Structures are given as structure tokens and as C-alpha cells.
Image: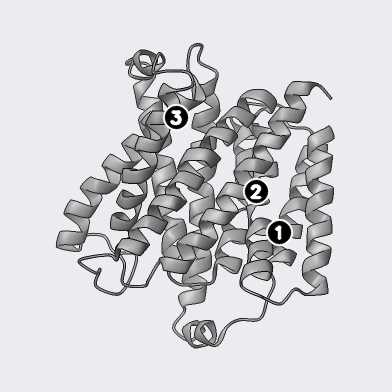
Amino acid sequence: MSSNEVLGIILAFGAAVCWGSAGVLYKAVIKADYSLFQSMVYRGIIAVPFLAVLTQFTTGFGALSILFQLDVLPMLFFSSLFVTLGDLFFFASLQRIDVSKSQPVAAIYPLFTIIFLVVFGIEIVSLGVIGATIILIAGIGLVSQKKSSSIESSLSETGDIRQGLILSIIAAIFWSFGILSLDYLLEIPGIDVFSLATVRFGILTILMAFSWAIFDKYRLISLTDANPKESISKRDVFVFGLTGILSWGIGAVTFFSSIELIGASRATPISSINPIIAVILGVVFLKEKFSPLQGFGILLVCLGTITISIL
């Protein structure tokens, strides 16, 4: 295994840690009556400047002229749109069900990514990688098994759990399309991961700002049954921003870099262990119970990840 491959694997793990941590933080502050558009705007307002500063002190903005070329801009826009929709449906899911259920279901995006990679002929995916991905997803499902809370039990009567799981699956599909478009963009000479992340999530924030101004005001689109709050506490704004830095800033850059080094078919499954991080954080900081079934799931995840890493 080359040094680039080792670095790519480490970066994919780093992305998983950031995304798992961000999911737990977001669940801690998101409320059923919070506007999803509004919370995503707050994430972008803090995360995009962070990315811009990071870009300036690393690679600079030399790739901006390439990103805004007419033959590149449409793919960049759709890539941003896919991520926007994926995040939107995922956060809508978190408003309905526990993160221990929403995040693992949304983490099946590697399965859709591999299917699309094969269908569109973007990458040659071996049977070993496909098998390891299935093992990985099975392990994630086992790790996330836990008894439903009393709140979830009452919600199940109204169908919120089913809605939450469906929203998570939709999020996974959109994220997989976002990864495919990302794989295409990173193959264009002259594009660096820092500039790409800054512009991509800048576009995402602008899309969310327009959606917040239009859809929430006239209630044209609603992924929650409650009326959105007019204001969000300063603490929650700070946490939303922190999740943006973790997921859109550090997590996205490390993931983009991983794709450059080892390809989407290997980086994506490794990054999908983020629910494991959420479970570990829950056990350590929230004193959640840890079952033998979850332990077996972690073994499956490790097996699947190691297999993908060496294939």
C-alpha cells in the first residue's frame, strides 16, 4: 500500500469523525419548530468564512477562475444542489427520530454511490469492495440498534419514525449523487479541494438563504408540521456554526482530499462509519448503554473498512 493510499484512508476516517460529531451536535440543538432552511444558513454563515480563510492560507483562490468556467459551473451548481437536498432531508429526519437511527440509515450512501459508479461507468468497482460495503452497512445498522425512547414510542403512532427513515434514505440518495459530481469535479486539472469546498458550500448557503426567504415565509415547502420559530438562541446559532465547520469545513476538505488519493469507491465506504463515532460519543459523554449487539456491529464495521482499505 502506497503512502498516498494510507493518507487517503486516514483522511476518510477523519471525515467520518467530523461528520459523526456534527450529527450529534446538530441533534442536541435542533427543535421540531426550527426552520431547516434557517439553521442551514447559520451553518453556512460561519462555515464558509472559515473555509475561505483556510483556502487563503493554504492553496489560495487560484482555482476560482476554473470553477466558474461555463463548462464547469453547471456541474458545480448541481453538486451543491445535491448536497443541499441531502442535508435538508437528513436534518428533517433528525427532527423526527433519534440520531442513532437517522444517521445509520443516511449512511447507506456508499451503497447508492457504488451502484451509480457501476451504472454510469465512472469507476470499476470490484466484487470485493461491493461485498465489504455490504458488510460495513450491516455493521452500522447493528451498532445503531437501541431501544426506542418514550418520545419515539409515542411518535411511532403518528408515523413519524417511518417518515424519518424515509427522509434518511432520500438524503443518502442525494448525497451519493453529490459524491459522483464531486468525483467528476476533482478530476479537472487545476481544481483544489479548498477552493472547491469554499465555493460549493457558498452556493449551498445562498440556496438556503433564498429558500428561507421564500419558502418559509409563504409556507410553500415544509418538512416539519410545526410553524418555524422567528428566532434562534445565540447558543444554538453557535452550535449550528460549529457543525458547519466540522461537516462542511474540516470534514468536507478531508473527504475531498481522500477522493483525490484513493477514489470515491474506496473513500466513500470508509467515511460512512460516522454513525460509529456518534455511538461512541453517546456512550462516553451521554452515558448511553452499550449492548453486545453494538459490539458485534463494530467488529463488522472494522472488517468491512479494513477490507476496503486493502483492496
Kind of residue at badge 2: Ser
Along the horizontal axis of the image, is 235 left or right of 144?
A: left
> Residue 226 location in percent, x, y?
29, 75
Q: Which residue is mark 2?
A: 272
Kind of residue at badge 1: Ile
Select label 3 or label 1 by which is in front: 3
Mark 2 or mark 3: name the one nearer the start of the chain: 3
Q: Nearer the viewer, residue 300 or 219?
A: 300
Mark 3 or mark 1: name the one nearer the start of the chain: 3
Q: Secondary structure at mark 3?
A: helix
For disc 2, the neighbor class at 10 Å (few under 14, some 14 to 19, many from 20) is: many
Residue under the image location 49 percent in, 53 percent down: 171
Residue 145 visible somewhere in the drawing: yes
Kind of residue at badge 3: Leu
CA separation in Å, label 3 and label 1: 32 Å
Q: Nearer the viewer, residue 240 or 83?
A: 240
Q: Which residue is mark 1?
A: 140
> Residue 54 location in percent, x, y?
45, 29
Is the Cβ of the residue at disc 3 closer than 8 Å to that at disc 1? no
Q: How many marks?
A: 3
Q: Which residue is mark 3?
A: 54
Q: Looking at the figure, which quarter contains the C terminus?
A: top right
Mark 1 or mark 2: name the one nearer the start of the chain: 1
Q: Secondary structure at mark 1?
A: helix
Residue under the image location 39 percent in, 30 percent down: 53
